[in-house]
Amino acid sequence: MRRVALVLAAGLAALLAGAAGLALWARQDLARPRAYPAPVEIVVERGETARAVLERLAARGVIGSPRLARLYLGQVLGGAPIHAGEYRFEPPTSTLQVLDRLVRGAVATHAVTVVEGLTLDETVAALAAAGFGDRARLRAEFAHPARVADLDPAATDLEGYLFPDTYRFPRGISEDAIADALVANFRARYEREVRPLVARGDERPVRELVILASLVEKEARLESERPLVAGVYANRLRRGIGLYADPTLIYGLKLEGRWDGDLRRRDLASDSPWNTYRTLGLPPGPICSPGSASLAAAARPADVPYLYFVSRNDGSHVFAETLAEHNRNVDLWQRRYFRARRPDGAPPAR
């Protein structure tokens, strides 16, 4: 009996040693980084089984044994589900790393840039053209002002609050998630970069600041001039002088579907609420999405005496304190400038 017991004990010890060795091998295999020739992109479809996904990954060299991976997924990770979506794996990766990403749903993301100065509709078009969202559904989401109601109770949509920046979104992201991301970015950047610039005692409503910033965004191309342009508008508002801002007129024409790239005299005489040649004060709302520099300029306009500015046609402007000085600048930089460039020497028609 004693000999039999010894044999059984030896056999059990060998079995346990073998099991331990097998477990060690399995763990090492799962943890071993695998080098494959190039990044591998796959799309996990909704309802696709873990077995099918793991076999596809094994066939492309991203993981080792799909059976071992499935065993680890079921026994160690408790049968955690694999999330649908687009994945990109770059060598070297281990099976454990791959499983971790699949279980967390760490899908691939793609960059899309919303540039400064786009209107709400232009932002919709840019995102849809880049493959992020359906145009009609994006427009519907951007039409809901509830996302900014606490910041701007008068907002009728998200114009001005779709912060221009480079975003990384997964393919298939929902339109409401895109709207949430753009507005959340506005909130974060406003609190971090803009609110600290507002002078004590000058806590204007966010809406007014964003409207002013949107005008600055459309008028100033040089960052150094943004505070100057904001200063001119602030001076005119303070003195009750019309803003005379072409971009507000253009925005109104875009809303009406009548903008063809040229402002005419009849447009300057229109009774549109966006016509700041005839209507005093700020326009009814933001006219585009301002970036950080324009928001900062609106929060702290330059303390300058200027009431006028006109383009030099190279991205810069010349500023003036008096109407007489401004008229001379207009003659030099608009009438003479364009007359010299027309074959017949005539001023541009409007």
Image (tube, helix red, strand yellow):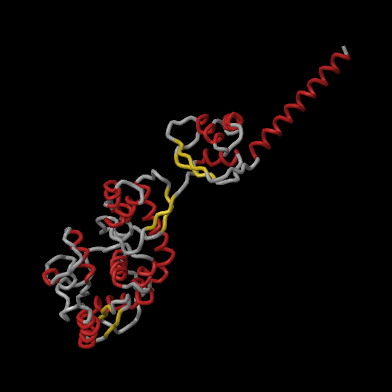
Closer to the camera, 318 or 8?
318
Work out whether 319 lies above or below 40.
below
For the point 26% across and 64% down, the residue is 287
Residue farthest right in this picture: 2
Q: Is residue 209 above or below residue 143?
A: below
x, y percent for residue 88: 50, 44
Residue projecting furthest to the front: 343
Return the x and y of residue 105 as percentages of the image width and height: 49, 41
State the residue in front, 41 or 193.
41
**Quadrant housing residue 261:** bottom left
Question: Which corner quadrant of the image does residue 339 belong to?
Answer: bottom left
Quadrant hosting residue 75:
top right
**Could you tell me which quadrant the C terminus lies in?**
bottom left
Q: Residue furthest top?
A: 1
Q: Is residue 91 above or below residue 69?
A: below
| Residue 342 percent across, percent down from the top left | 20, 78
The spot of residue 212 in percent (x, y) is: 29, 69
Q: Is residue 272 left or right of residue 214?
A: left
Residue at x-position 51% and y-position 33%: 53
Please give the count of numbered marks on the rendered protein. Answer: 0
Q: In the depicted view, which residue is nearer to us: 68 or 6?
A: 68
Q: Residue at x 29, y 82 (%)?
A: 318
The N terminus sits in image quarter: top right
